[in-house]
């Protein structure tokens, strides 16, 4: 029986994806607080650590050399270069959680989410979107973490992300954050039963 298929005694995998600025990380954090049996899957990245982040909790912060070595040795279930940095999910992290009966929540980009689903078919897939692209742009600008160039790159991916997001079983529009959290919570509660 494939890992992550939701069989009794096996950990379950839940992916939340969205274009940058759609609120996926805020929603994912709220879900973690509501579901004590869920843990965040910790992805690996080559990007710089932001204020308040911790290695091994927010991400595994790797050098480009270490990351590419792990790609070559097949240690990632998915990985991608985004905005000049590598991001990926280590197979060992997933396999250990499933084996130990722990449930993992992934806050990953849409391509990464679909790669996880391909290797772990029982994965629950939730795509978060904003009501429209203007709302998304406003949220990204208000974060004040993006240069104009990075903002343009993020917005340039939106059409592709929205199209690929249609392959997810569940679509949640984050027009009102509390409503979106409740909707995602209901989907996850039904899945974990």
Image: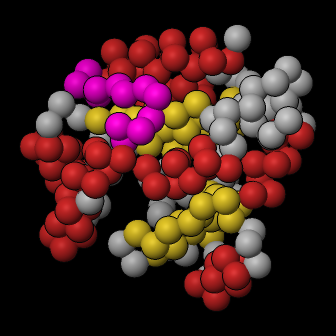
Residue 166, compared with residue 178, is above or below; it is below
Question: What percent of the width, then of the height, locates residue 178?
Answer: 35, 18
Residue at the far left: name it. Answer: 134
Q: Is residue 29 visible?
A: no
Q: Quadrant of residue 155?
A: bottom left
Question: What percent of the width, then of the height, locates residue 52?
Answer: 52, 56
Residue 135, compared with residue 110, is above or below; it is above
Q: Is residue 62 visible?
A: yes
Name the residue rendered at 36%, 21% in the picture: 180
> Where's the C terminus, which quadrant?
top right
Taking 107 as reference, is 102 left or right? right
Q: Quadrant of residue 2?
A: top right
Name the residue rendered at 59%, 25% in the picture: 33
Question: What percent of the width, then of the height, locates residue 106?
Answer: 58, 43
Name the residue rendered at 28%, 54% in the picture: 160
Taking 183 as reference, is 40 left or right? right
Q: Which residues are magenta?
A: 165-176
> Where's the N terminus, which quadrant?
top right
Observer-nearest of 125 and 189: 125
Taking 162 as reference, is 79 left or right? right
**Residue 171 part of the magenta segment:** yes
**Colour scheme in the image?**
secondary structure
Name the residue rendered at 68%, 50% in the picture: 119
């Amino acid at each position: 029986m494939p890992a992550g298929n939701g069989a009794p005694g096996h950990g379950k995998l839940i992916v939340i994806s969205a274009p940058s600025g759609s609120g996926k990380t805020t929603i994912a954090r709220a879900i973690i607080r509501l579901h004590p049996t869920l843990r965040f899957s910790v992805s690996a990245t080559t990007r710089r650590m932001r204020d308040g982040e911790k290695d091994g909790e927010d991400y595994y912060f790797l050098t480009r050399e270490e990351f590419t070595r792990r790609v070559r040795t097949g240690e990632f279930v998915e990985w991608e270069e985004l905005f000049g940095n590598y991001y990926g999910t280590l197979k060992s992290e997933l396999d250990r959680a499933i084996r130990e009966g722990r449930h993992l929540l992934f806050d990953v980009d849409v391509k990464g989410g679909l790669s996880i689903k391909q290797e772990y078919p029982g994965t629950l897939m939730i795509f978060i979107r904003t009501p429209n692209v203007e709302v998304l742009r406003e949220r990204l600008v208000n974060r004040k973490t993006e240069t104009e160039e990075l903002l343009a790159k993020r917005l340039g991916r939106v059409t592709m992300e929205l199209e690929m997001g249609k392959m997810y079983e569940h679509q949640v529009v984050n027009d009102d954050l509390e409503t979106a959290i409740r909707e995602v919570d209901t989907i996850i509660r039904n899945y974990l039963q």
